[in-house]
């Protein structure tokens, strides 16, 4: 499989850490002033510890729409691959952000591109884009499709966050609420085609940690065993136990990589899912890969969910860190929890 092109789009409204702190102060004006300032200092320390600096969200007042950014990314990726929309014979929509439970979100993009081709959705939290690559390669190898477009539209801060996430929380609540303050928004589009070089996909699933990160829908209690961690912030609100997630991800991914790659010197660059820059730096040191583990997305764009790796690949290409012919490993950790290693030639 060859990744022919990747396009990355963010909305226009940049939100800094200082903006978030201002929103918290505005939202909690009725609270005790000293307690509010103490709370803001805690959040500020957590931002510094994670490495968060900014994130981009839609300018709703200006009419900015997720679908417009998605369509623009798709058109750009198709053109960059030297194709026109009618050359695409399958569209896979993946990720967390979506406007519909039915029909497949992919069908709306296909219609907007003015084409008729097969289209469906894949959802596996922050692993969605990587899993879509695996599915796409399977189709390419069987010659079911020749040119596949993989897209995601990770836009959810208004639908599943703002303004409720600005509410003052107890220390216990901060433990599973803070990560929502680092979420950014983005759309990506990727064109893949068949090549002699097949990618290798490996996954490890640890379902005993599924409740550590969840974003529940109405009626969710009918679809899982009772668990106080699930839905702790209510429906349509992210719950992410950051400390436990980081510790588990670091332990499991380090073990996974060391088992798969006794010698890491043959890999030119590693792309993780970026939910904390500081955690990634620690993992890079433990694995002995140093600055070959790309960690520059989170500080600027925040946690982009399933869009974080394609966004990172775009940014790395722009700055010259990623070039054609490099041996690449994608190494996302996702809610579930699921850990992935995808190796191929870029």
Image: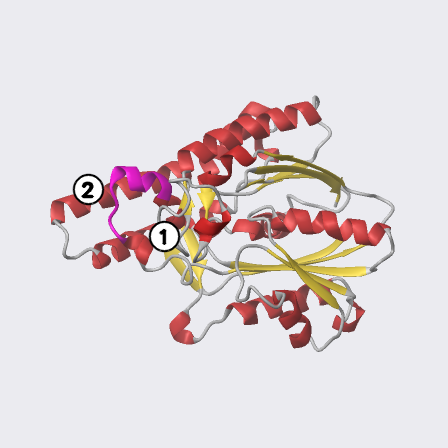
- From the viewer's perspective, tell me whether residue 119 is left or right of residue 143: left
Per the image, the residue denoted by label 1 is 234
Which image quadrant is residue 289 in? top right
Name the spot of residue 307 as percent of width and height, x first: 57, 53
Which image quadrant is residue 73 in? bottom right
| Disc 2 packing (10 Å; few <14; some 14–19; many ≥20) | few
Residue 174 sits inside the magenta stretch: yes
Residue 261 sits inside the magenta stretch: no
Q: Residue at x 44, y 75 (%)?
A: 63
Q: Can you see residue 245?
A: yes
- Residue occupying the far bottom of the picture: 114
CA gap between label 1 and label 2 equals: 25 Å
Magenta region, main secondary structure: helix
User: What number is the disc on residue 198?
Assistant: none
Q: Residue at x 65, y 76 (%)?
A: 112
- Residue occupying the far top of the picture: 262
- Residue extent of the magenta highlight: 167-176
Per the image, the residue denoted by label 2 is 38
Residue 130 or residue 346, whichever sits in front: 130
Q: Can you see residue 53?
A: no
Name the spot of residue 278 as percent of width and height, x first: 45, 35
Name the spot of residue 66 as percent of width and height, x first: 52, 67
- From the viewer's perspective, tell me whether residue 283 is left or right of residue 77: left
Q: Nearer the viewer, mark 1 or mark 2?
A: 1
Which image quadrant is residue 118 in? bottom right
Residue 161 or residue 274, whichever sits in front: 161
């Amino acid at each position: 499989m060859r990744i022919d092109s990747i396009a990355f789009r963010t909305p226009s409204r940049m939100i800094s850490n200082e903006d978030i702190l201002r929103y918290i102060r505005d939202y909690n004006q009725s609270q005790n002033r000293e307690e509010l300032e103490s709370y803001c200092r805690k959040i500020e320390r957590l931002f510094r510890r994670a490495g968060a600096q900014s994130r981009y969200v839609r300018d709703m007042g200006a009419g900015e729409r997720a679908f417009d950014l998605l369509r623009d990314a798709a058109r750009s990726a198709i053109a960059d691959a030297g194709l026109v929309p009618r050359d695409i014979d399958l569209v896979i929509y993946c990720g967390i952000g979506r406007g519909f439970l039915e029909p497949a979100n992919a069908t709306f993009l296909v219609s907007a591109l003015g084409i008729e081709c097969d289209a469906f959705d894949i959802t596996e939290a922050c692993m969605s884009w990587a899993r879509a690559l695996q599915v796409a390669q399977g189709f390419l190898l069987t010659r079911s499709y020749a040119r596949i477009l993989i897209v995601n539209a990770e836009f959810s801060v208004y639908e599943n966050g703002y303004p409720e996430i600005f509410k003052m929380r107890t220390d216990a609540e901060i433990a599973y609420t803070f990560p929502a303050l680092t979420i950014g928004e983005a759309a990506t589009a990727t064109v893949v085609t068949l090549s002699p070089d097949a990618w290798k996909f490996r996954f490890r699933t640890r379902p005993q940690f599924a409740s550590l990160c969840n974003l529940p829908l109405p009626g969710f209690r009918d679809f899982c065993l009772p668990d106080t961690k699930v839905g702790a912030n209510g429906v349509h609100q992210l719950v992410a136990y950051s400390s436990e997630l980081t510790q588990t991800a670091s332990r499991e991914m380090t073990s996974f990589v060391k088992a798969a790659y006794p010698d890491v010197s043959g890999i030119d660059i590693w792309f993780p899912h970026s939910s904390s820059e500081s955690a990634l730096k620690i993992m890079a040191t433990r694995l002995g890969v140093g600055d070959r583990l790309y960690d520059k997305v989170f500080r600027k764009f925040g946690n982009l969910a399933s869009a974080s790796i394609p966004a990172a690949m775009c940014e790395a290409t722009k700055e010259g860190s990623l070039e054609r012919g490099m041996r690449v490993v994608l190494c996302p950790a996702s809610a579930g929890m699921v850990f992935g290693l995808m190796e191929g030639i870029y």
